Image: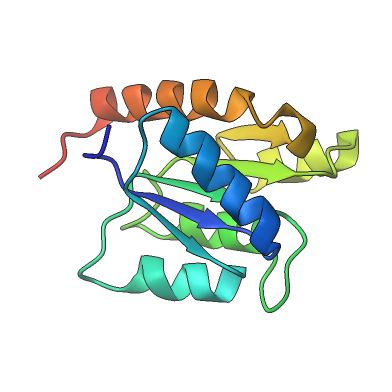
Amino acid sequence: MDKYKILVVEDSPLIRRMIQDVLAKGGFHNVEAVSHGKAAWDRLSDEGEIFDLVITDIEMPKMDGLTLTKKIKEDERLRHIPVIVFSSIMAEDIKRKAQSVGADGQITKPEIDQLIVSVGKLLKRGEVKTERV
């Protein structure tokens, strides 16, 4: 599972650590974490970096998760990267907004154990679409 590189975007240090711990239990150890959407966008825009999946919170400083997801999905070089919106807020209007910007999955923070299942499914689906160089 370490062949996959995952970017976690979460402003809460505690939640960031929880996500990393859950991913590690699922065998995903190649995880980088940043504290807001602008930092994530900067990392994703770095030509030398390749990420296989992004997990993002919605409400964050500097750039929110919906804006980040929209930018990823509109970018020719990045649009293939699956994005999971991971937020405590998952009302119907937020779900619709996440879908409208191209999110590949949505999980509420209380359902953190579902994260591994969603990550595994999206990464397997991505293998079918594109081969990693």
Where is the C terminus found, in terms of image quarters? top left
Q: For residue 32, say whether it is visible.
A: yes
Q: Is residue 127 left or right of residue 98?
A: left
Looking at the picture, does residue 102 appear above or below residue 121? below
Picture quadrant of residue 65: bottom right
Q: In the rendering, at what x and y percent does residue 118 appear? A: 53, 25
Pick whichever, 32 or 78, lies toward us. 32
Looking at the picture, does residue 38 appear above or below residue 122? below
Where is the N terminus found, in terms of image quarters? top left
Name, please, the residue furthest toward the left: 133
Picture quadrant of residue 81: top left
- Total residue callouts: 0
Give the residue drawn at x 36%, y 30%. Answer: 27
Q: In the rendering, at what x and y percent does residue 122 appear? A: 43, 28
Q: For residue 102, say whether it is visible.
A: no
Give the residue drawn at x 73%, y 75%. Answer: 61
Q: In the rendering, at what x and y percent does residue 46 appear? A: 30, 73
Pick whichever, 75 or 1, lies toward us. 1
